[in-house]
Amino acid sequence: MPRDWIAPLKRLFPAGRVSTVPKVLDAHGGDAWFAAVRPEAVVFPRSTAEVSKLMAFASRRRIPVTARGAGRGYVGGCVPQKNGIVVSLMKLNRILELNTADGVAVVEPGVITAQFQAAARKVGWFYPPDPASRAESSLGGNVATNAGGPRCLKYGVTRNYVLGLEVVLADGTVARIGGRTQKNKTGFDLVGLFVGAEGLLGIVTRITLRLLPHPPARAGLSATFTSAHAAAGAVQAIFAAGFLPSALEMADSFTLASARKFLGADRVPPGQAQILVEVDGRKEGTRAELAELVRLLKKHRAHHLLLAKNEAGCERLWEMRRNYSASLKNSGLVKLNEDIVVPRSRLVDLIRFAAGIQRKTGIQVACFGHAGDGNIHVNLMIDPKIPGIQKKADRALDELFEQIVAWGGAITGEHGIGLAKLPWWKTATSPAVRSLHRKIKDALDPSGLLNPGKFV
């Protein structure tokens, strides 16, 4: 039976803004993770005022509301766990301002990340955060998870570029926080409170972003090694020599083997481990850095060096790197992707620990990702047909997360907690920290209507 609030909800908005069609509901019940829950209605607002109207309505009737962007998350962060209403922000998709004099852009949350980067590039400016899903993910989703990507090593994560937000609170109140200046110390850092909050504290409807002048040149290289330990050691050597690359990635043997099978052996160099390094800046500087990096890596027994001396060459290397996740999915095994972070000095320890999990459990472990900042994607590759494999994988994840926390790391670097990491929320946080989260949630959303069923 239809809920008694469905008809009044539809009357609130112009025709087409609210859907209860089963196919639409199912399409908005999950993300890239495996779990999904069908909402009772999906609303497609076109303005902040409409989001405010929706939240005031939901607040009066105590209806759960889950905000959703492009649905490209990996942890079930936008699954409407308590049914209710999903508010899709994908119709709020305008770039409202690109101001090169101020180095500022104002966007709506449904703008696709790669499209925004391209628009900024056309006017000579640069938005660095570059999650692997940038061609599909929305800026609102990036804000919700504080998304990163390879370039955050040098340039920082999404939070470092958010100057201001327009946020609709649980009762429909519209709050405009932050501003459009590079410095702003007026009160608490409320912008930082909402960035990475996974939609639990408010619904972002407008984002003011900091831009940088676009670097005039890029250069990079791929180098392979005889072992992942050797590759991790080379990562440390790069920093010890005083380099700060714009990106520094790493991949292990199973990842490379899967990529050779998926992309073709001619497109992935031979070797048991790989690092991919990119530098940017003035043309003369990038060429000089590239030459120095080649000399350094040869000393560390790198082989099969592939050099990229310009932007087109760098993009060819990145095309290879961006296909690593798809290559693992193509292996025929189910990929459990854990975006853990360790202090960079623990990279070699992490590789050894992952190998130990593989020996102990028989589960193939594939490691690749952002070695420069310690954000390695540890993927458990499981065959679901094997009896008891899921329990074995869960025990392996228990060990992995406990060790990561013991090293001073984090159980998630860019995907968020969502539902997938919920079992390890208490492992990762102290009672005092969990209590603080609860107090903030209770203050801003006392009825628990926003994205309920998640970590707070």
Image (cartoon, rainbow, N blue to C red):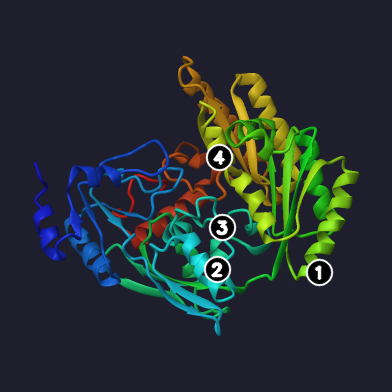
Relative placement, left or right, of 8 versus 402 is left
What is the crowding at mark 2: few (fewer than 14 residues within 10 Å), some, or many (at least 20)? many
Residue under label 2, please give it. 161
N-terminal of the two: label 3 or label 1?
A: 3
Residue 5 visible in the picture: no
Residue under label 3, please give it. 130
Relative placement, left or right, of 286 versus 80 is right
Q: Position of residue 188 (x, y in %)?
A: 50, 72
N-terminal of the two: label 4 or label 1?
A: 1
Residue under label 1, please give it. 284
Question: Dot 1: what SS?
Answer: helix
Residue 360 visible in the picture: yes
Q: Which residue is pictured at 54% across the width and 62% down the height?
A: 158
Instruction: Tell me the distance, in whole angstroms, between the alpha carbons under discs 3 and 1.
Output: 25 Å
Q: Position of residue 151 (x, y in %)?
A: 64, 58
What is the crowding at mark 4: few (fewer than 14 residues within 10 Å), some, or many (at least 20)? some
- Location of the N terminus (image quadrant): top left
Residue under label 4, please give it. 325
> Comparing marks 3 and 1, which lies closer to the viewer?
1
Amino acid type, residue under disc 3 in the picture: Asp
Amino acid type, residue under disc 1 in the picture: Glu
Q: Are marks 3 and 2 in contact (CB under 8 Å)?
A: no
Question: Dot 4: what SS?
Answer: helix
Instruction: Tell me the distance, in whole angstroms, between the alpha carbons under discs 2 and 4.
Output: 26 Å
Relative placement, left or right, of 54 versus 288 is left
Foreground of the two, 154 or 114: 114
Q: Which residue is pictured at 67% across the width and 61% down the height?
A: 311
- Toward the bottom, the furthest residue is 101
> Comparing marks 1 and 2, which lies closer to the viewer?
1
Q: Are marks 2 and 4 in contact (CB under 8 Å)?
A: no
